[in-house]
Image (cartoon, grey):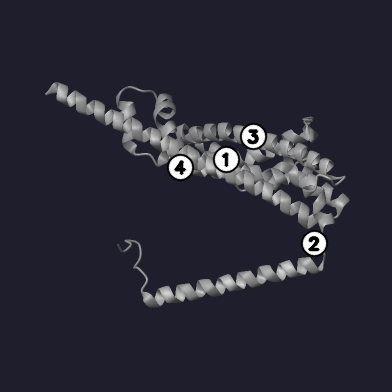
Amino acid sequence: MSSVLYDAPGPRSRRRTAIGSVVAGIAILAVVTLVVLRLAERGQFDAQLWSPWLDPADENFTAVWSLIGEAAANTVLAAALAMAFSLVIGTLLALSRITAAAWYRWAIVGVIELLRGIPVVIAIFFAARVLPQFGIDLPTLWYLVIGLTAYNSVIIAEIVRAGINSLPVGQREAAESIGLRRSQVLGSVLLPQAFRVMLPALISQLVVVLKDTSLGFIISFEETVNTAGIIVQNLHNPIQTYLIIAVLFIVVNYLLSKFAVYLERRLSRGKGVSRKAEDAAMSETGRAGA
């Protein structure tokens, strides 16, 4: 069946696409082969460079993984705190922007747009350097959390606002017609549906929060990437160390993405079950009335 978005490619187009794919594949393979050969010439595949990570008999194996374990725990803690605060503050900002009167809505919009325009690294650096000037001395963890929250909360606020605005107007009107207050309409009717709609975008932003914890190195926070740099200075194996750290981040982010897919399917299945139950109840009501 032909697509409604574009015309199906003909034999000549399919042939050109196949040739282009083969050429691109050969080019990528050639580049990868060249990189591997260069690394092999420089001894980057020597066992002594990999053994601190892969060989339990190596004298540095336990120390390396202990350091990375502590750093990973710090990373997860910072990410979890920033995620929680960002979700709460972002949701409150979105609701405030939606319900605010025109005479002070500009202040909320101004804060959101200001923080959206600031790079997250600047937010982290600002929290770590400026807050102590006002006598707010906190552990380094909290400066990172404050910086991440300041940036990501406004992003989540826009995601939540977009999710609420994407709902049919009839949802709000139906809730108001039965006498619900504005806060009840938002909390009981609109927000639950909006969160289901914007779940993929929210999970994607939470993955960004996890990756942005690596910016903690600018304030000497002992997270995974900063600790990897210390290991590199002592073992002189940057390619091996950062490759393994990259794999760890990829695995964690992949698991978060799969969790998002699972959660979305679970919520969709629950919605489908409730819809079927509602239809069945309506059908029984109709038969009873007959």
Residue under pointer 4? 162
| Residue designated by label 2 | 44
Q: Residues within 10 Å of mark 2 (few under 14, many from 20)?
A: some
- Three-letter amino acid code at the position of disc 4: Ala
Would you say the residues marked 3 and 2 are in contact, meaning their CB atoms lie under 8 Å apart? no
Q: Earlier in the sequence, mark 1 or mark 2?
A: 2
Dot 4: element = helix
The crowd level at tag 3 (other Cα within 10 Å; few <14, some 14-19, many 20+) is some
Q: Which of marks 3 and 2 is nearer the N terminus?
A: 2
Marks 1 and 3 sit apart, C-alpha to C-alpha, by: 17 Å
Q: Distance from label 1 to label 4 (Cα)?
A: 12 Å
For the residue carrying disc 1, how many other residues have a C-alpha within 10 Å: few (<14), some (14-19), or many (20+)?
many
Q: Nearer the viewer, mark 1 or mark 2?
A: 2
- The foreground one among 5 and 276 is 276
Q: Earlier in the sequence, mark 4 or mark 3?
A: 3
Q: In this view, does 64 lie above or below 88?
A: below
Secondary structure under badge 3?
helix
Is residue 60 something that shows in the picture?
yes
Q: Which residue type does callout 2 highlight?
A: Gln
Give the Cα separation between the discs numbered 3 and 2.
Answer: 36 Å
Q: Name the residue under label 1.
A: 154
Q: Where is residue 130 in the image (x, y as percent from the top left)?
A: 76, 38
Quick check: marks 1 and 3 in contact, CB under 8 Å? no
Q: What residue type is labelled 3?
A: Ala
N-terminal label among 4 and 2: 2
Total numbered badges shown on the rendered structure: 4
